[in-house]
Image (cartoon, grey):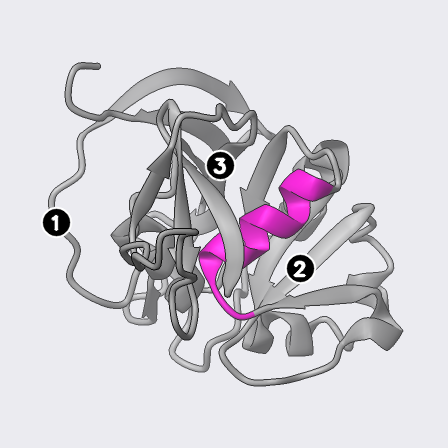
C-alpha cells in the first residue's frame, strides 16, 4: 500500500509499506519507484545549539538563555508548521512553553501508534509520511524541529535542503549531540547570517548535493 511521496531533488520517490502493489500485467512495483512529478516542499532542519555543539544538557533539557525558545517559535510560527519527535512533543505539555508555539500544522513523528490529536498534533510514522502530510496541507517549507533522532532520520534519508542553526551563548560541556549517531559527511554552504540579539546568531546553510 502506498503511504507517502517524498521529493528528492526534482523527482518524487514513492515508498511502499507492507507489500508493493501489482501492475495491471501482474508485475510487482519495486520498493523504490521514481516518479517525475515535482514537489514544492522545501525541507528545513532547525535547531538551537550551544557553542560546543549540543542541543540539550545531559538531562535532555535545552537550557538555553532567555529568549531562545521565543526566537525558535517565531520561525516555526512564521512557517506555519513543525515536525517533532514524541519526546519533544511531550516536553510541550508545559502550558507556558506550548502557548508560544502556534503553527497551523504540527506533526509528531513516532514509530509508536500514539494519538496526540487532542493537542492538535497529527501522527506520522516516518519522515516521508510527515512530509506527505504537510505537502497535502499546502505547506511550502517543512520545518524539522527535533529532537536528535528526528534530525538524524531526515539527514540519513537525505531529506534536508537547508539547515538553520540558532547558535546560543552557552557551553554545556556535555549533553545531547545534534544527530546522536554517525552520518555520512555532508557539505554545507552558508548563505545567510543574522543576529538574534547581542549574543546569539542565526546561521542558514544550504545542503549541497552532487552537481550543486
147 part of magenta stretch: no
Measured as percent of width and height from the top left, residue 136 is found at 70, 42
Q: Crowdedness of circle 1 by 10 Å Cα count: few (<14), some, many (20+)?
A: few
Q: What residue lies at 33% left-to-right and 47% top-to-bottom? A: 51
Report the Cα–Cα distance between label 3 and label 1.
Answer: 19 Å
Q: Looking at the image, which residue is at 59% across and 70% down? A: 88
N-terminal-most mark, 3 or 1: 3
* Residue extending furthest toward the left: 185
Q: Is residue 45 above or below residue 193?
A: below
Query: How many marks are shown on the rendered structure?
Result: 3
- Can you identify the residue that label 2 sits on? 107
* CB under 8 Å between discs 3 and 1: no
Q: Is 62 left or right of 53, judged from the image as shown?
A: right
Q: Are marks 1 and 2 in contact (CB under 8 Å)?
A: no
| Disc 2, SS | strand
The residue under label 3 is 43
Residue, disc 1: 184
Please tell me whether the stretch drawn in magenta is mainly helix, strand or loop: helix
Label 3 packing within 10 angstroms: few (<14), some (14-19), many (20+): some
Secondary structure category for the residue under label 1: loop
Which stretch did the figure color magenta? 125-136
Instruction: Give the CA distance from mark 2 to mark 3.
Output: 14 Å
Residue 26: x and y in percent read 34, 59
Instruction: For the C terminus, give its image quadrant.
Output: top left
Amino acid at each position: 500500500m502506498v503511504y507517502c511521496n517524498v521529493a528528492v531533488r526534482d523527482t518524487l520517490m514513492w515508498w511502499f509499506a507492507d507489500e508493493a502493489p501489482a501492475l495491471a500485467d501482474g508485475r510487482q512495483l519495486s520498493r523504490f519507484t521514481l516518479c517525475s512529478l515535482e514537489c514544492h516542499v522545501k525541507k528545513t532542519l532547525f535547531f538551537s545549539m550551544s557553542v560546543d555543539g549540543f542541543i540539550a544538557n545531559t538531562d535532555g533539557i535545552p537550557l538555553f538563555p532567555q529568549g531562545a525558545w521565543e526566537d525558535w517559535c517565531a520561525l516555526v510560527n512564521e512557517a506555519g508548521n513543525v515536525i517533532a519527535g514524541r519526546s519533544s512533543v511531550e516536553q510541550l505539555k508545559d502550558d507556558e512553553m506550548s502557548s508560544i508555539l502556534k503553527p497551523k500544522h504540527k506533526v509528531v513523528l513516532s514509530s509508536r501508534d500514539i494519538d496526540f490529536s487532542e493537542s492538535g498534533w497529527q501522527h506520522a510514522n516516518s519522515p516521508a509520511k510527515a512530509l506527505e502530510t504537510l505537502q497535502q496541507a499546502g505547506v511550502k517549507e517543512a520545518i524539522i524541529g527535533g529532537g536528535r533522532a528526528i534530525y538524524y532520520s531526515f539527514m540519513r534519508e537525505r531529506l534536508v535542503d537547508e539547515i538553520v542553526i540558532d547558535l546560543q551563548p552557552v557551553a554545556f560541556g556535555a549533553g545531547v549531540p545534534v544527530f546522536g549517531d554517525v552520518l555520512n559527511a555532508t557539505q554545507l554552504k552558508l548563505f545567510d547570517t543574522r543576529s538574534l540579539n547581542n549574543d546569539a546568531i542565526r546561521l542558514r546553510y544550504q545542503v549541497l548535493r552532487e552537481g550543486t
